[in-house]
Image (cartoon, rainbow, N blue to C red):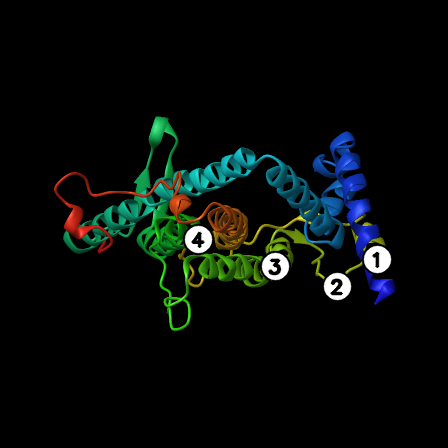
Amino acid sequence: MFTGFVWLITQIGLGFYNIGYALTHPGLWLNWADSEALIRFIYYGASVEFFFAVFDIFLVVTVVGLIYRPFMWGMVRGLEGFANVVGRTAAWAGLIMVGQQIVIVFLQSIFRLGEISISPLGIGFTQSISWYAEGLKLWNAAVVALCVSYTFVQGGHVRVDLIYAPLRFRAKRVVDMFGALFFMLPVCTLVWMYSWFFLWRHLITPKVSASDRIDLLMRKARIVKWNVETIGFSPDGFNGYFLFKILILCFVALVALQAVAFFYRSFLECIEGEDAEGKYLDRDTLGAGEEAYEGTH
């Protein structure tokens, strides 16, 4: 147990060093013209070093927030505001999806067209009807992945309150803090680690995996090359499925940020009492005269 404690303290200390080193040597991991820099970016993007770098940032922000409470409220407002902006923007993908489906049905059923050409600014883009039909899944995935934290902020997620509902105010906040730290964040860490390499396995060759050590990956760097996945489920179907893998990472990142915001909000509401409930919370409203329908949409 003592060895594990020493390892933890060492990794926390190295996290600060790694942050400083990464910021002062960006060419070692951002210059993707260099295959070794690309491999370093891939390896460290889901590594123990990256985890403790993020953990150190969380520790510093938390300590500063404990010392100066308005700073923590500012973090809550910033993170929840970011979730709202991303979610409200991504929600328009639903309208695009509906419009695209109408165009597909109209052109296919009325005019019997086999392909659709779009030429914005004189730049031609032609794909088959089946490509656009399968591409509808991307808009749906964008709504799910990018609106998840927005839905959480708005209180629109589904929850079953068998034990939680009868608890007192501060007991609820303690449960919320525990859930954010020991359920939301650990799951996000695991999903990020596997999704990160799942993405890169379909962007470059030779393939990389979470079990590869840095020395093995650096040897692979000598022959690495871009090989973006462009295979669809049908011959003329949508072939940008690597975009779904990017959306998985966006989903995980948004949930992780919201977990931090939820932890901070729960802590502050627990400390300040019921008067702080919903403080600075920016939720959508149907407008004047529609109060009776709030919470039903």
Residue corresponding to mark 2: 211
Which quarter shows the N terminus?
bottom right
Q: Which mark's residue is nearer the viewer, 4 or 2?
A: 4
User: Which residue type carries mark 3?
Assistant: Phe
Decide which of 51, 286 is in the foreground and name it: 286
Q: CA distance from mark 4 to mark 1?
A: 35 Å
Compared with 154, 24 (above or below) is above
- Residue depicted at 55% across the width and 37% down the height: 69
Q: CA distance from mark 4 to mark 3?
A: 17 Å
73 vs 116, left or right, is right
Residue corresponding to mark 3: 198
Decide which of 27, 271 is in the foreground and name it: 271
Q: CA distance from mark 2 to mark 3?
A: 12 Å
Q: CA distance from mark 1 to mark 2?
A: 21 Å
SS under mark 2: loop
Which numbered disc covers residue 7?
1
Q: Which mark's residue is nearer the viewer, 1 or 2?
A: 1
Which numbered disc covers residue 143?
none
Coordinates of residue 22 in the picture (x, y in percent):
76, 36
Q: Which mark's residue is nearer the viewer, 4 or 1?
A: 1
| Sooner in the amino-acid sequence: mark 2 or mark 3 | 3
| Sooner in the amino-acid sequence: mark 1 or mark 2 | 1
Compared with 215, 68 (above or below) is above
| Sooner in the amino-acid sequence: mark 1 or mark 3 | 1
| Sooner in the amino-acid sequence: mark 4 or mark 2 | 4
SS under mark 3: helix
Residue corresponding to mark 4: 145
